[in-house]
Amino acid sequence: MTNCRSLRRFAALALLASSVLFSAMEDAEAQPAGFNYDESKVPAYTLPDPLTCLDGSKVADSKTWLTKRRPELLNLFAEHVQGRTPKGDVTVREEWVQHEPALNGLASRKQVRLSFERNGVKRHVDVLVYLPAKARGPVPAFIGLNFSGNHTVHADPGIILPTSWVQNDAKKGVTNNLASAQMRGESATRWQVEKVVGRGYAVVTAYYGDLFPDRADGMADSVIALFQKELSPSDWNAIGAWSWGLSRITDYLASSGDIDLKRLALHGHSRLGKAALWAGAQDQRFAMVISNDSGEGGAALARRWFGETTKRINTSFPHWFNGAFKQYNDNEAKMPVDQHELLALIAPRPLYVASATEDQWADPKGEFLAAYHAGAVYALFGKKGVGISEQPAPEKPVGDAVGYHLRVGKHDIAEYDWDRYLDFADRHFGKPSGK
Ligand code: GTR
């Protein structure tokens, strides 16, 4: 009870600290002031070197990277940016499972509720999986969280609606924070389910609000409440909770036998791209990581003061990163890390960073440069990164172990992005059998 109250108190403080609260998700047009779109105003900056350890020694081989520098950087990101993910065990149950033919014979649809229990607190996440109907044995898969509920990724009437809190949107029939069938298929273009399944990959998704409702006071209703304790500034927050959930879903996939974990690609768009990068950095079972327009706190360099800034993101979304991260508002040069090092934590696994021309808020150039600078760590493994040092022209994909493209268009995941991700996965994983 006391712990629950402390969670609520922390959440209430976070709410107070937020001068502007954005309820409209992903609305790039409605961004607040306090950003820079003028390239000539980007000040000079020096990036921290991923290959220099805290004791000043240099990393010259992959072994030192894996055993010394990688843990060091993970720890710095946990302490100063995302917060520390607790290690404590949680009781996980498959509360219900449904498995039926779907998509006119193209796939089977599996839905499972994973319930979590710890210290008398219960939470759950509903997982939706489309398995290619022709699959024999474990298949490669794309896993990613969704913004508005599993039922929004495809119009398939068999998808179970979320029961947890969703953002109200009267025009789309969402009132009282309850999901509405009117939103079925709303985000279908972002998921391209038929295309992905048709190429031989499973689609795995879950609603991010099951793990942490995306509002400044969401913590008390999130999975963080399972780990009751007094919160300190270095504790985890929404991005940490979303990535924790991705790992728990992966535990389930590992036990289900449906998915070939060696070919599991994790993707995320925007704030969920930030979560995908953090999940991929911590959990090396994600065999490939794709960051789509993840911007500030994701792939974009924080020190390159363009588009959204650290202060802006911490003000609009105080519940995403940890308390310690707030000390870098207008003070990015003091951060012990920058985002190229978050990307480097994915090495040597294939990594893809994508930007969009009209998504200046996310700083496409800063996203490219972070991908470029992560290449120093891939080189330790004898792998090539993006291959060029200047951002490529729109729709000229580049890269080897680190892929990059700049799509023409707005902040979104479009078919163009999916075509690139599928080709990238085929290239690194091998084409799924029969394709
Ligand atoms: C914006 C936020 C970005 C990005 C985006 C989204 O409002 O400033 O950092 O994450 O939301 O998630 O769509």
Image (cartoon, grey):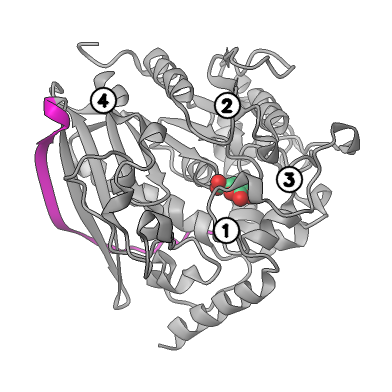
**Which quadrant, please, contains the C terminus?**
top left
Q: Secondary structure at mark 2?
A: helix
Residue mark closest to the camera, 4 vs 1: 4
Q: Residue at x 62, y 45 (%)?
A: 28
State yes or no: discs 2 and 1 in contact (Cβ < 8 Å). no
**What's the magenta region?**
84-105
Q: Residue at x 77, y 53 (%)?
A: 33
Vertical comparison of 330 with 71: above or below: below
Calculate the distance from the C-alpha at mark 4 to the C-alpha at mark 3. Answer: 45 Å
Residue 28 colored magenta? no
Amino acid at pointer 4: Val
Residue 29 on image: x %, y %: 65, 45
Calculate the distance from the C-alpha at mark 4 to the C-alpha at mark 1. Answer: 32 Å
Mark number, residue 320:
1
Which class describes the residues within 10 Å of circle 2: few (<14), some (14-19), or many (20+)? some
Say which residue label 4 marks.
197
From the viewer's perspective, is 171 left or right of 71?
left
Residue 26 on image: x %, y %: 55, 47
Residue 92 colored magenta? yes
Say which residue label 3 marks.
54
Residue 335 on image: x %, y %: 76, 50
